[in-house]
Image (spheres, helix red, strand yellow):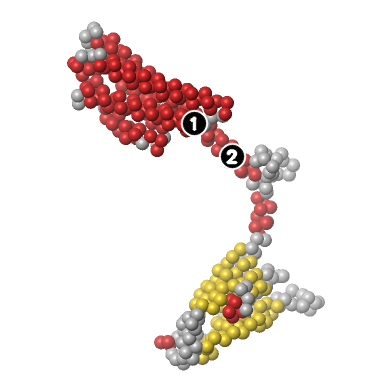
Amino acid sequence: MAAADTAKILERFMELASREIDVIATRVRFEPAAQATVVQILHGLSAAMKKTILDFAQTVQSLSEENRERLLSPLEKSGSVNTMNLLIPLLELGDATDPGFLLHEAAKSLYAMANIIDWEASVFEFDPFATPLYIMAAQVLEMGALQLDLGSQLSGQADNELMQETIKAMDQKISYIMDLPEGASIPTTPPDTKPVSLTALEKMLEVCKKFYKFEGCFTPTFEKDKQLIRIGPLAASYPPIPLLVTGFVDLGGMHDHDVVTITTKVLEPPCISATQQGSGGSYVIWRVKTFTGHQHSGMKHFQEFADLLEVPGDGVELLIAQSASSHNFDRAFLLTIPYQFLVESTSEPQFILT
């Protein structure tokens, strides 16, 4: 590779690295007292880096063509040019990357190139006029590496302080939601707040309403033309936990002369007496609705067969029965009745099919 090409790559490399310092200056976040000073330092490093680029270019131009070749060719042979070509696309992305990391890598590259040139100047005998310029070029690159390294360290320090702030905020959140031992001091929490016990939260969640879904399909036959769906409390639950039931039954598959009846029942609490105490009560009829023939609107909401959007109670039963079939329950033409129910309760209810 010609010396001119190597010089252009190196100058481009340093120019892009200098821009990363400006990117860091817009990103760093320090304590208010130090913020302005750090930004001022970064702008100073950026200006110094630009001067370093100019000094290097002038030093290289002061050499004869032969001496420029002898100065820069070791950079290509050592792989430094390849390294710069790999880093340049990342540097060109600007603030889309981690500028602190890129400055650190760029600084290492310049340090390495400064050492290569300095070693060449000390080992080989060059033109007496050129040797000081070789040494000067090495010093200029080393100074550029130092400037990039300082920018990288400031970026790393800013990232570290940001991480410390994040950890502090996380500690506050952890302290805000915790179980405190009896008599323990209250940890630092956000202003006007106090820690909340996890145990207390769990107890509150136990009595919060939750939603449970139950769904399926029923296909009436001549042998079994009824399906009883019981949505009720757990068997061991007494007194039973109240719930709200809503949902739909899909009768869209009905044909002329089909007859389907939906009976809604609710669990009636027992009378509390010496003989009945602890009894689970009994299911009594709430509504009975019969649907005949083809349904223009097959989806039947709770309100259409129970007269309420939601049926409250300690338990709810739905009896779906087909009393007449247009095809006399011929197995090739059986009616399928999908259903889905949404239950609101503080604990999961029982779903029983009989």
Q: Amino acid at mark 2?
A: Ala
Which label sits in the foreground, 2 or 1? Answer: 1
Near-viewer residue (29 or 348): 29
Write down the quadrant of residue 305 in the picture: bottom right
Q: Would you name the residue on which mark 1 appears? A: 28
In the image, residue 336 sits, relative to residue 240, either above or below, namely: below
Residue at 45 percent of width and 25 percent of height: 42
Residue 190 in the figure: left or right of residue 335: right
Residue at 40 percent of width and 38 percent of height: 96
On the image, the x and y values in percent for residue 273 come to 80, 77
Residue 2 in the figure: left or right of residue 260: left
Residue at 23 percent of width and 7 percent of height: 128
Label 2 CA crowd tier, 10 Å (few <14, some 14–19, many 20+): some
From this viewpoint, is residue 123 visible?
Answer: no
Label 1 CA crowd tier, 10 Å (few <14, some 14–19, many 20+): some
In the image, residue 38 sits, relative to residue 299, either above or below, namely: above
On the image, the x and y values in percent for residue 126 come to 22, 10
Which disc, if any, is residue 169?
2
Separation of residues labelled 2 and 1 (CA atoms): 19 Å
